Amino acid sequence: EAQVTQNPRYLITVTGKKLTVTCSQNMNHEYMSWYRQDPGLGLRQIYYSMNVEVTDKGDVPEGYKVSRKEKRNFPLILESPSPNQTSLYFCASAWRGVFGANVLTFGAGSRLTVL
Amino acid sequence: GNSVTQMEGPVTLSEEAFLTINCTYTATGYPSLFWYVQYPGEGLQLLLKATKADDKGSNKGFEATYRKETTSFHLEKGSVQVSDSAVYFCALKETSGSRLTFGEGTQLTVNP
């Protein structure tokens, strides 16, 4: 089954404790992206990647890091989490055509709480 | 920059009622427009899309028409069901880019 898999789905952590949210897709998509979803703000893009070893900032990259060492994986790293990073996070991927990324396939989401 | 504005929610309807969720956008050029739906506890999934002016996207009884003159892409359904209860997101993508810009989302609840 074609899918985007995120882990963990739920996490409660404390301020300053480094964490990684993994994202893996099995569709051979070139494009991958991370979003955070907050009430009243919709989805905001954190980082995206057009292909292996190619990453770029989205609208809200502060406090996050990413890497794209393999095509299928795109982990989101919070080096020193803070309470304002409490959110619902979504990873998404897409086939990249001539005009950029096509329709996104989303993971099920990872709900992160930072105390 | 690009932006998408959706009607404020939440929206509560009775089963078989008519649904309209308004979406307007600001963008340069000729973006592609999308409606994504998020069912409880799940990620977003594409509901429908339109890639040029006057295109109509449709799926599962939902429709939206790309109106360049009013910069709108309103979502409609003639008769909603309880199973349509979800959050609906309007989004746009620039013609040559990869970034999607989302609206705030509209929570729809359909009561039996």
Image (tube, coloured by chain):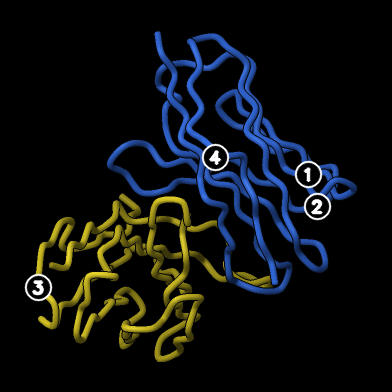
Q: Which residue is mark 3?
A: A14
Kindly give the residue lying farthest to the bottom in the view shown.
A53
Where does the C terminus of chain A fall, quadrant-wise? bottom left
The subunit letter for the residue under badge 4 reads B
Secondary structure of the residue carrying tag 2 is loop
Secondary structure of the residue carrying tag 4 is strand
Tell me how far mark 1 sits from mark 3, CA to CA: 45 Å
Tell me how far mark 1 sits from mark 2, CA to CA: 7 Å
* Label 4 environment density (alpha carbons within 10 Å; few <14, some 14–19, many ≥20): some
Q: Left or right: where does residue A13 sit relative to residue B72?
A: left
Tag 1 near tag 2, CB within 8 Å: yes
The hue of chain B in the figure is blue
Of the two numbered discs 1 and 4 on the same chain, state the one appearing first in sequence: 4
Residue visible at 42% across and 33% down in the picture: B86
Under mark 1, the amino acid is: Tyr
Kindly give the residue lying farthest to the right in the view shown.
B69
Q: Are marks 1 and 4 on the same chain?
A: yes
